[in-house]
Amino acid sequence: MVQKTHLKINRKLCGEPVEIMDGSSKVRLTTTTQMAADQYGLIHGGFIFGLADYAAMLAVNHPNVVLGSANVKFLKPVKTGEVLIARARLKNTEGRKIIVVVKVKRDNEVVFEGEFFCFVPEKHVLA
């Protein structure tokens, strides 16, 4: 499926799309030292959230999709050099409101999960 949203996103910071299907997506991110929050190489949670958010947007895959809110859990720490895979799938659609479930894994271990409450306005929010 052709990507229709977030075309200018920085893929080094938010991940590289691996798969975009109708109602789901898979995005891969390799963490870097630039994402580290401390001397131990702990990755700042904002980068993991950004990966999950990007996967949610790609699962909706509409040019005007925006995030309204999210209910998330950080389950395990992530460090530099690790490869993360975010999988997103549509859970529910009610008009313009779409709930997307996202899980981020390192190998087979879930490090982050959440529900993303997305909206698809008639026109771009900045138009």
Image: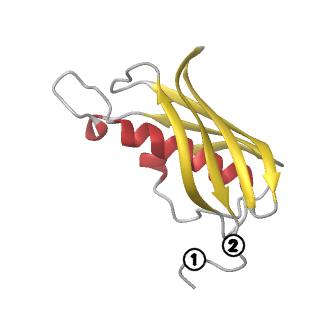
User: Neighbour class for label 1 at 10 Å: few (<14), some, many (≥20)?
Assistant: few
Q: Residue at x 69, y 72 (%)?
A: 121
Contact check, label 2 and label 1, Cβ < 8 Å: yes
The colour scheme applied to this rendered structure is secondary structure
The image position of residue 110, as x and y in percent, is: 56, 19
Judge from the rendering whether residue 83 lies leftward or rightward of residue 36; answer left or right. Answer: right
Task: Identify the element where label 1 is drawn.
Answer: loop
From the viewer's perspective, is residue 33 above or below residue 13? above
From the viewer's perspective, is residue 56 above or below residue 109? below
Q: Residue at x 62, y 77 (%)?
A: 124
Judge from the rendering whether residue 42 lies leftward or rightward of residue 86; answer left or right. Answer: left
Q: Which mark is residue 125?
A: 1
Q: Which mark is residue 60?
A: none
Q: Amino acid at mark 2?
A: Pro
To which quarter of the image does residue 55 belong? top right
User: Neighbour class for label 2 at 10 Å: few (<14), some, many (≥20)?
Assistant: some
Q: CA distance from mark 2 to mark 1?
A: 7 Å
Q: Amino acid at mark 1?
A: Val
Q: Which mark is residue 121?
A: 2
